[in-house]
Amino acid sequence: MVNLTIDGKQVTVSKTATIYEAAKEVGISIPVLCYAKKLMPYGACRFCLVQVEQMKGRLIPACTTPVSEGMVVTTISDEIKKVRKTVMEFLLVNHVLDCPVCDKGGECDLQDLAYELESTSNRFEGEKFDLPTDEVNPLIERNMNRCVLCGRCARVCDEVVGYGSYSFINRGFETKIATAYDRGLSCEFCGQCVSMCPVGAILPRPFKFKARPWQLKEVDSVCGYCGNGCTLTLGVLNNKVETIRFNDKIGVNDGNLCVRGRFGYSYVNHDERLTKPLLRKDGELVEAEWDEALQVVADGLANAQKGQGAGILSGARLTNEELFVLKQFAKTLGTQNLDHSGGECYKGVTEGLKETIGISASTGTFPQIEKANVILAIRSDFYETHPVVGMVVNQAIRRNEAKLLVLADKRGKLSKLPGAKTLLTKPGLELDILNAMARVLLDEGLAQTEGVDGIADLQAALANFSPAQVAERTGVSAEQLQAAARQLAGAKNSAILMAYGLPYQGLNKELATAAANLALLAGIPGREGSGLYLCGEKANSQGAIDLGILPQGNGMGAQAMFTAAAAGQLDALYVVGEDPLSSYPDRDRIAKALDKVPFLVVQDLFLSPTAQQADVVLPATSFAEKDGTFTNAERRIQRVRRGISSPGQARADGAILTALAGKLGSSLAFTGPAAIFAEIGKAVPAYATCSFNEIGPQGVVWGGESLQPASRKVVAVAGGSEVEGDFRLVTGSALYHSGTVSTKAKGPMAVLAEPYVELSREDAKALKVADGDLLKVAGNGVELKLKAKVGNRLPKGVLFAPYHFAEAQVNRLYKGEAVIAVKVSK
C-alpha cells in the first residue's frame, strides 16, 4: 500500500493505483474525457492534469500517473483551471455545436465539462468539421464531426472486444477516428464503442430521436439471452423498452454487452406478441378469455393423467421462481414426465460433470478467466454462444499474456486473438484430442493423480490415443497435442471452456467428461484462480439444472416423451417457453409426435410453429416483464426486474401455473418471488445462503468463487467417429442470434436476416458457387435449399449452418449427431 496526500486529504491505496483512482477513493472528482475504468490508461484528453509537489508543481495527467509514497497532489488551482479551460477551447474550435439535435444531449461528457468549466466563449477560431456521417450499417451511426479523439472506441474494440474496427488516421488537424480504408463500419456490432463514446460521435441508430435520457425510466436487470448473465439497464418510455443503457457501475460484466444484449431487446415490443389465450375451435385457433382457457387446459391435463399421462417441457429462460412453481405444478398434476431444453444438451453437466467431479456446475467464476495463464476453449463457437465471456478471454490475453488453445473443427473469432493456437481437427473427433492430451499428462508424469480415482482404468482406455495415433486420425500434429497438454499442466491458473445447447447435442456428455478428466489431471477443479466452465445456451440453463427440471423418478425425459407421443402412448404435452418444432433436432420426428398427441398446450411469447399446432395457446411474458432471479453459467444468482407491463392479457409463467393449479384444486399461491425464493432455499441448499432481497448488483455465487469438487474420478470415454463423405455438415449458433427468439428482434435481424450454409472458398470454387447462390444440401433422407455464404474459416469439405431460423428447417437434417454426412450441389 502507498500513502499520499491529495488536496490535503491523506489517502492509502494500492501501489498499482493511479492518482485519478486514488482521488476517486476519497471522493475527489478529477475531470476526464478519455478515461474509462475498464480500459488501459491513455492520457489523451489532458483534462485530468494535476500538480505534484515532488515534480516541482509540473502538470501531469492523473489518469496515467501511478501513485508513489509521500506524493502530494493538488487537483484544483487557478493554473489548473486555466489549462483545463484552454483544453476545452481547443476541442470546441472544430467541434460542431449541434447539441439540440444530438442524441447524446443530456448525458454528454463534453457538455458536462463545458458547464463545469464555465466555457461560454472561445478565444480561438477555426472551421467546423464537415465530414460525412457513416450510416452504412443498421445499428451504429458514426458522426466524426462530433469526435473529440479520446480513442475510447478504438481502445475498447481492441482491448475488450478484440475486433479492431477503429484506428486513428492522418495527422495534426486532419486526425480522425476511422475504419480500415475509411470505409463504412462493418463489424460484429456489439455496440461497445457506443457505450464508450463520451460524446455523440457514435450512437445507436435504433434509439435515434426516440427520447432524451432524462425521459427514460432506467431498470437494472439481466439479459434474457445466453448464460453469461450480463447486467443490463432497460431504458423505458411509455411502457416500452426503447433502448438498452450502458452501466459499468453495477453488475458483473463491466457494462460489456454483445450485439444481442445491446440491440436484441425489441422482441419484447413486437407486434406479434401474444396478448390473449387461444383455443382451437372447429380446427382454428381463436381468442378466448383466461378463465375458459385455463379450465380447458386443467381438464385436458387431468384427463390425460387418468389415461396414459401428461408430460411437461420447459425452456431455460424462465426465472428460478417460475421453474420452482413449474416443478410444484408437475407434482400437483401427478406427473414425473418433466424436462427442459430437449433433454439431451445439458447432460454434459448433469451426467458428465456429475460422474467426474461430483457437481453439476462450472467450478469457477468469469473474472477468474481474466487471470488465467492458459485457456482451453472447446469448440470455436464458444465466442458465438457466449460473446462477453469471449471478451474476458481477449482481456486475459492482452493484459495477462494468457495462452489460448482452441480445439475446434473450424476457425472462429477466438482463433484470431493474439497468439491463439487452434487445434483444427476433423469434425466429430474433438474427443480424441482431449484423450490424447490426457495421455500426454499421464505418460510424462505431469498429471496430478493424488486423490483421483479411476487412473488405472483411464490409462488402459487411452492405449490407442497416443499423440501419433490421434494426429493421424484428426489432422492435428503430435507436436501440437503435446505442447498443448504441457502448457495446460504447467500453468499456475488455467481455464477450460465449453458451451452447450440445442445445436450441440452430439457427444455433449462425452466431451464434458473428457474435459473434466483433463481438468482433474491438470489440477484445475477447486484450485483458486482456475476453473472448468460449462456454459449453457439460455439465460437460466444453470438454474433449470439446479432446480431439477429433469425427469422425476421413473418419469420420461423430452426424447422419451416425443417417442411415446408418436406411438400414441402419451395423452397430453404441456410446452412452456419452448419451440421444439423449430429448434429441437429431428424436426420430422417432433412434428409426428405433436401431430399424434391428443392434447397439446403451448405457453409462449409468440405463435411459434409449435404453438400453431396446439389445442390451447397461453400468452406469457418476457424477461423485461417479470421479477425473479436467473442463475448464470458461473453459478451467480442475479435479480431480474420488471421494466414494463405485459402486453394485453399476457401473464407471467408463474402466474399461469399458479392459476392452473387452482383449477386442479391445489394451491400454489405465493406472496411473490421473495417467498418462492425462500422455498427454493429449502429444496436446494445452495440457494439457502441468501434471501431474495439480499441479492445485490453483483449477485450471489452459490458454492463460492472456486467450487470444490464433491468427488475426483476420471472416467474413460471412447473417441469420436469420423464421418465419411465429401462434405460434412455441423450446426451451431451464429454470433448475432440466440435460440429462435432473437429472430423476432430487429437488431439481430438487421445484421443476419436469413439462414445460410457456410463453406470454404476452396469448396465454393470447386462447386462454382458464389455468395448468395442457392445450394442443395442433402443428408439423412432430407434435402434443403440454403443460400451459400463463402468464407475463410471452414476447412475443405466442412459446412456450417446455424439453427436459429425456423423457415430453414435445418433441424430436419440435424438429428442430434455431432456431424452429418451430406451431399452438396447447385
Image (cartoon, grey):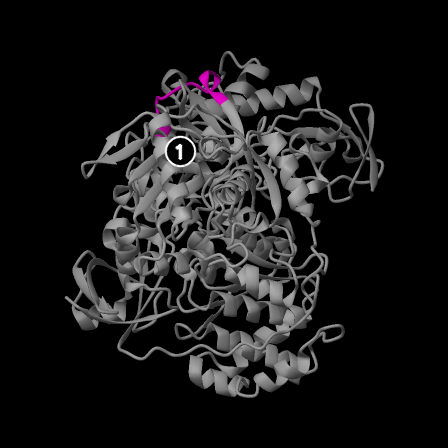
Res 472 → quadrant? bottom left
Nearer-the-camera pick, 783 or 768: 783
Residue 324 appears at what percent x and percent y? 55, 41
Residue 488 appears at what percent x and percent y? 63, 70
Nearer-the-camera pick, 380 or 728: 728
Neighbourhood count class around disc 1 (C-alpha, 10 Å): few under 14, some 14–19, many 20 upward: many
Residue lying furthest front: 306
Would residue 739 appear left or right of 272 to someone viewing this image?
Answer: right
Would residue 824 appear left or right of 208 to someone viewing this image?
Answer: left
Say if 623 sits above or below 588 in the image: above
- SS class of the residue under badge 1? loop
Residue drawn at x 45%, y 57% as measured from the top left: 557
Would residue 811 be counted in the magenta stretch? no
Q: Quadrant of the C terminus?
A: bottom left
Q: Magenta stretch?
A: 205-217
The residue that disc 1 covers is: 620
Could one spot residue 477 in this view of the protein?
yes
